[in-house]
Image (tube, rainbow, N blue to C red):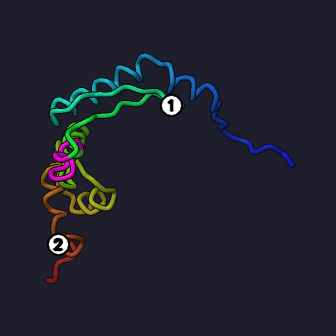
Amino acid sequence: MARKQGFVPNRKNIGLILKEDSGIAAALDDIAEDAAAKAGGQVVKYVTDRQARSVVVDAEAQAIDGTATKAMGETAGQRSGRNQNGGFVSRSQWRRAFATGLSDAEERAKATSGGYSGLPERKQK
């Protein structure tokens, strides 16, 4: 049987990059330190088959309030299912918003809150 054509990733090199690249380490440190500062925790660095960072917080605070989870969500720019900078969370939200033909992204996002039936072209005349 012939080998498949197309892109074939070099898994050994990808693994090596994920494990040893200083740029990836810097990006992980930046994200983890920001989340740790918001959560009041500390960053633990470790390496498995790739570099990783862990934000360690008080177990009780995490169990009751989800402090580390909330801090990571804020750091990633998402909270309560909505993108912090006013963007779209899902592809369907984007499609519905652009169907209205509004020019401003924030206005399109607001227009989608009523769902597909709330679009102007779907309203009863």
Q: Main secondary structure of the magenta part?
A: helix
Q: Residue at x 21, y 29 (%)?
A: 34
- The label shown at residue 118 is 2
26 and 68: which one is in front?
A: 68
- The residue positioned 16% from the left and 70% from the top of the image is 114
Is residue 83 in view from this perspective? no
Report if residue 58 is visible in the image: yes
Q: Residue furthest right?
A: 1
Q: Secondary structure at mark 2?
A: helix
Query: Magenta part of the protein: which range?
Result: 60-68
Residue 5, located in which quarter of the rendered image? top right
For the residues marked 2 and 1, what is the alpha-carbon distance in whole angstroms?
49 Å
Q: Position of residue 97 (x, y in %)?
A: 23, 59
Kindly check if marks 2 and 1 are in contact, taking CB atoms under 8 A apart as contact. Answer: no
Question: Farthest top residue?
Answer: 22
Mark 2 is on which residue type?
A: Gly
Under tag 1, what secondary structure?
Answer: loop
The quadrant holding residue 115 is: bottom left
Residue bearing the label numbered 1:
48
Amino acid at pointer 1:
Thr
Residue sitting at the far bottom: 125
Question: In percent of the image, x 24 and y 45: which residue is there?
Answer: 69
How crowded pointer 2 is (Cα within 10 Å; few <14, some 14-19, many 20+) is rated as some
